[in-house]
Amino acid sequence: MKRLLLLTGLLLLPLFCGCSHNYYNLPQNMVAERVKVLGLVPIIVDADSDIRHPQKEDLVTLLINMNRSFENDLLRLVKNTNSFYAVTMVDVDPKPLFSSLLFRRERRDDAGIQYNKYFWKKEPLADLIRKGNLDAVMLVVVSGINRQDKISSNNLLDSLETDYNFLIMTAQILDAQGSIIWEYPNFRQKVLSYNPLLNLQYPDFDEARANMNPTVQLKFKTVEGIRRILEKRRQDLLLREKREVDIYTSQFEDMTSLMDIDTDSKEVQKDKQDIKETKK
């Protein structure tokens, strides 16, 4: 019995002691050395993605304005990771930049996670990084995707499983060679998870029930309703509104929680020591 308890304790020890995890596509010491200055490009809206809202132009305009309102919160959270020497906002119009950078968009289903992955032209990307005196850029894209989901009514008595039109947020950190240093959704997590930004549709259970209709109609949320949802602020334990909006901040926190570099790790410390000795 004692041996069993000892073995169990040894197996659980890493859970209590904790361990660093590298969410980057490179070893942490290489990231710490190669990416000292990171440029955050203003959040991009991919208007040509699978956004099926009947008032698409109005929705895209709303998203552009929402991005401008809250992207400084992302900048602050990236800085707070302390993973880079400096993080700066790139002074550029995201719409023409997106047109010049985009090579192709690819709808992906990786490990059960459905999202849009972006591939970029190397020359304009390198030019952007060189002109900004940056080591790498972070590109964040809001796009549309249709995927299956199941939504229940408020009383949990009804549900509808079908394809819904979602807004999602993806991100990449790239260097001047076009190498993907980090990405979101991130597949280096121990437990994979990825939440969409917003479901643009809803099943009208009340309408079906009121008319005794066995078919539940799928409807799009209004643009004004989407604005109110995106602007909804978090609340504290006393139900008082906080400064942070809920949906954008949740996405930003999900991203930045996967950007930590363990600067106290042996690899990073050894790399720093090697650089000091080289400079002597």
Image: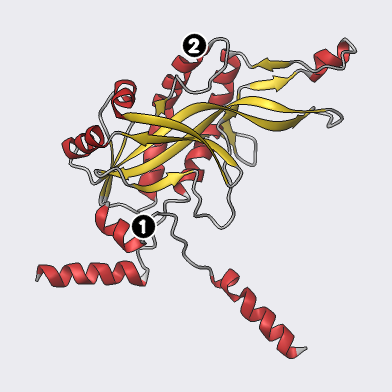
Which picture quadrant has residue 54?
Answer: top right
**Above or below, 230 relative to 191:** above
Q: Is residue 123 left or right of residue 168?
A: left
Which picture quadrant has residue 277?
Answer: bottom left
Residue that label 1 marks: 26
Q: Residues within 10 Å of mark 2 (few under 14, many from 20)?
A: few
Give the SS element for disc 1: loop
Can you give x and y, in whole percent of width and height, for residue 55 in the image?
A: 54, 10
Can you give x and y, in whole percent of width and height, for residue 32 in the image?
A: 30, 58
Residue in view at x 38 percent, y 45 percent: 78
Q: What amino acid is labelled 2 in the image? A: Asp
Q: What amino acid is labelled 1 in the image? A: Leu
Q: Is residue 40 left or right of residue 77?
A: left
Q: Which mark is residue 230?
A: none
Q: Earlier in the sequence, mark 2 or mark 1?
A: 1
**Above or below, 230 relative to 276:** above
Image quadrant holding the C terminus, namely: bottom left
Q: Is residue 189 left or right of residue 239?
A: left
**Above or below, 13 relative to 100:** below
Give the SS element for disc 2: helix
